[in-house]
């Protein structure tokens, strides 16, 4: 696998913030502001503001638990359900050619937030390792994030219209 170069992540590494990023997002009443694309009873989907690639989202349980072993059966299904939905939405809206899907568990693995487990979904396109540095300025990134947010929402809305 080609490694993605994401220079804007330096800001995230320097300013990791306080508290839990996921619980803070959940507390917000403005989903657009915190880039939550979908909420369920047991899980939710939020965009990564320091993406490894365009369309990078994370699916987390609502409950603040640190490891995949802590999830109960309902949460496992809820997380998987939202993961499937956002992948279908991304397929429709952004047409990636593949995905990296996975969990970083524990600080040593590279996890940024170690005590609230989350599943990464990173869309991949042929040649994308060369594409992202073009939009490496923070301002451009935030504009690009909102555009991507709208695209994912559009894909999710379409799913809702297909499903009974
Ligand atoms: Zn949390």
Image (spheres, rainbow, N blue to C red):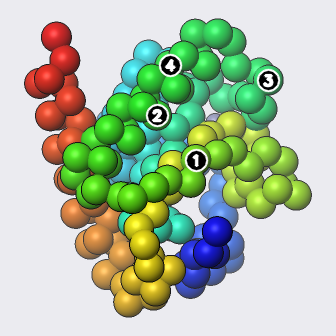
* Label 4 residue near ligand 1, CB within 8 Å: no
Mark 4 surroundings within 10 Å by alpha-carbon count, few (fewer than 14), some (14 through 19), many (20 or more): many
Q: Secondary structure at mark 3?
A: helix
* Label 3 residue near ligand 1, CB within 8 Å: no
* Residue 82 at x, y percent in the picture: 43, 29
* Residue 155 at x, y percent in the picture: 21, 42
* Label 1 residue near ligand 1, CB within 8 Å: no
Q: Are marks 2 and 1 in contact (CB under 8 Å)?
A: yes
Q: Earlier in the sequence, mark 3 or mark 4?
A: 3
Read off the residue under disc 3: 69
Q: Are marks 1 and 3 in contact (CB under 8 Å)?
A: no
Q: Residue at x 17, y 34 (%)?
A: 157
> Which quadrant, please, contains the C terminus?
top left
Read off the residue under disc 4: 78
Q: Earlier in the sequence, mark 4 or mark 2?
A: 4
Q: Are marks 3 and 4 in contact (CB under 8 Å)?
A: no
* Label 2 residue near ligand 1, CB within 8 Å: no
Q: Earlier in the sequence, mark 2 or mark 3?
A: 3
């Amino acid at each position: 696998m080609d490694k993605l170069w994401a220079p804007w992540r330096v800001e995230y590494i320097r300013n990791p913030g306080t508290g839990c990023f996921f619980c803070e997002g959940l507390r917000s009443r403005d989903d657009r502001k915190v880039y939550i694309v979908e909420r369920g009873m047991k899980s939710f989907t939020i965009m990564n503001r320091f993406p490894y690639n365009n369309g990078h989202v994370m699916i987390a349980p609502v409950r603040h638990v640190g490891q995949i072993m802590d999830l109960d059966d309902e949460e496992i299904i809820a997380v998987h359900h939202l993961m499937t939905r956002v992948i279908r939405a991304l397929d429709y809206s952004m047409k990636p050619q593949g995905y990296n899907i996975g969990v970083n568990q524990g600080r040593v693995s590279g996890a940024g937030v170690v005590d609230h487990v989350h599943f990464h979904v990173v869309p991949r396109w042929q040649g994308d390792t060369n594409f992202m540095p073009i939009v490496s300025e923070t301002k451009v990134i935030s504009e690009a994030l909102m555009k991507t947010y709208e695209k994912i929402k559009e894909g999710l809305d379409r799913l809702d219209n297909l499903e009974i």
